[in-house]
Image: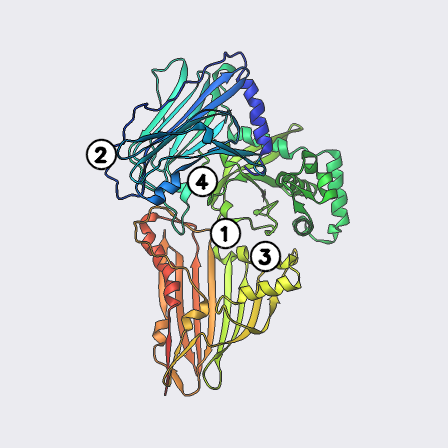
Amino acid sequence: MSGLTPIKAALLSSLLILSFNLLAQSPPAYDWEPDRQWTTGIAEDDESLIMIKNHVQYDYVYEGNNLIVYQTYHKIYRVNNDEAVQRVNRIYIPLNSALDIPAVKARTISKEGKVTELDKNNIKEVKDEDAGAGYKIFAIEGAEVGGEIEYFYTKKASANIFGREFFQYGHPVLSTSFKFSSPANLRFEFKSYNGFAEVVQDDAVLVKNEHTAEMGKIAPRKQEDFGSLNANRQRIEFKLSYNKSAGNKRLFTWSDAGARISGVIYPFTTAERQAVKDFLKDLKIKKLKTPLEQFAFAEHHIKTTFYIDDNASDAAEQVENVIKNQFTTQRGFTRLFVAILEELEIKNEIVLTSDRKQSVRFDGDFESWNYLSDYFIYLTDADKFMAPYHFEFRLGLWPAEFSATEGLFIKNTTFEGTSVPIAQIKMLPEMPYTNNYDQMVVKVGFSSDLSENIIELERGYNGYEGQFIKSIALRANAEQKTDFLESLLQFVDETAEFTEKGFSEENLGYDTWSDYIRVKGTFNSTKFIEQAGDIILFKAGDLIGRQSELYQEDERQNLIENDYNRGYLRTIEVDIPEGYSIQNPQDIDMDVEASDNGRVVYMFKSTHEIKGNKLLISIDEYYDQVFFPVARFEEFRKVINAAADWNKIVLVMQPN
């Protein structure tokens, strides 16, 4: 998890407290069924890959003065074609946090009952220098179509205080079991998601805490457009909540996390505070009117001159060293910006949350610190967020995958001269579509012989796309900038050669970063014209560029989830050739929308007007709600596909 080394270090130190005065324990042995036969009675032969068994087991034990976990994974697959064999006949055992791999077994069982077991000499270890760990790898010998591949391994590792296990995949699972044991003094809590069975405690076991969960068939869960896979997969989250040997105090709460994060960011030494004062003085920010404007200026300067190095030492996170060396880690940049805010007396809160697209959605009701992956800062009076180490963003905008989700907000207050952090779960809001607009103005004329169009194009971006484009434009040299500019303009015609092109507005300053960046160009093209005798077939739909299409044969599984809210405003002006008229202008007009709670949240609307020899087209399309119910997928799909349908419009121009 990025930027959370201090939390992990704090957790490791906590384990020493958990393990005092307790006797060593032996981990339970795990083994498979020795004489298992090929499985009969499976009615899923139409599936290429079937997981017959999925067993996950965690056994926490004390060894010496350490808390250790033995993690066991046991899987049995039926492979019904060559592709399935290739997918699962190579096994990887991740070695992150591993102390040992005490048990590994694998075998294949053919449909005829032939058994081939793993030769442990074939297990290879691969080092991953970048990740600081690696993995063991081995191939399954004897795998055949129609046969079964089975393996299990046990990994001995340093104990995790928090954990997450997924139980749903892109193939069916026929039987799933989860088993979890811990010493009697350590009480873990569990939460199941997306329909997975609740974890229950076995009260018959007295010498330790034992929990289990079992599921029958689990249907496949697959990636879908406008949806997040991991957030919708069946899973279990777990965390350590009590150490009965140390009393009944609840452990690892959000308040505890707030205190530890606050201790990581604060306090600032005298040298750090002085370095910030000197830095701001050198920037001459006093000439700016308000503290907020001063901060925006400092942020822009830092994000255009400093760089990030997450392999930097702890010393590089000291604010005076950050300013001197102009580089630091993610945590170091968070400390730097908080220190600047403190110096400017701007109230702020540290925010931690998780990526709702690649990870899972933050659940404030379950106190797992696994959700605390990335730092942000909330300026309370200004009601603005900032992303301290995402250099393409400026105050008021932060990565979309960390919006429309909960987070842990940590406010540092002072009580009787003592710094006291207050932690609360609050929302990082979704931005309205008006903050993320793509505007396009197109003017189209015809050559005198009607064989080609002369097209003037201007396109403007703000919000997420705008700031991403600006971050590239800011650092690009002249040649790179020209190539990049062309790529932004060629969306209507990939072969277009521009007679003119440029940025009509860049707005790369600290005070204009949230304003539009606009590009423009002029080119000739034959792409939009087809002639049938004296009739012109004008491909007006192609003027908006290729559009997303959302067609899905299978029943929709996942909640609709947009990356972010966004709008598209397109104005098209076409000079109708002299002596011609348009026979089907009504094809231009479309009106498709979806509402939620009485509000239009998704819309595609196109209208037209003919004034003299000019055809004026206006298209307004927007998406103003990140999440939408899966049961109403068809309504969302119709709006998405409206743009793709408009893309196909061909206007018939006929001589009068």
Left or right position of 332 against 165: right
Name the mark nearer the viewer: 3 or 4.
4
Counting residues from the start of the chain, the first of labels 1 and 2 encountered is: 2
Q: How far separated are the C-alphas under marks 4 and 2?
A: 36 Å
Q: Which residue is mark 2?
A: 41
State the mark number for residue 360: 4
Counting residues from the start of the chain, the first of labels 4 and 2 encountered is: 2
Q: How far separated are the C-alphas under marks 3 and 2?
A: 62 Å
Left or right position of 60 against 171: right
Counting residues from the start of the chain, the first of labels 4 and 1 encountered is: 4
Mark 4 closeness class: few <14, some 14–19, many ≥20 residues within 10 Å: some
Identify which residue, 496 or 656, lies in the foreground.
496
Q: How far separated are the C-alphas under marks 4 and 1?
A: 20 Å
Q: Horizontal and vertical percent for residue 411?
A: 58, 36
Q: Horizontal and vertical percent for residue 312?
A: 66, 38
500 lies above or below 417: below
Counting residues from the start of the chain, the first of labels 3 and 2 encountered is: 2
Q: Horizontal and vertical percent for residue 419?
A: 64, 30
Q: How far separated are the C-alphas under marks 3 and 4?
A: 29 Å
Q: Which residue is mark 3?
A: 514
Q: Which residue is mark 1?
A: 431
Q: How far separated are the C-alphas under marks 3 and 1?
A: 13 Å
Task: Identify residue type, mark 3.
Answer: Ser
Task: Identify residue type, mark 1.
Answer: Met
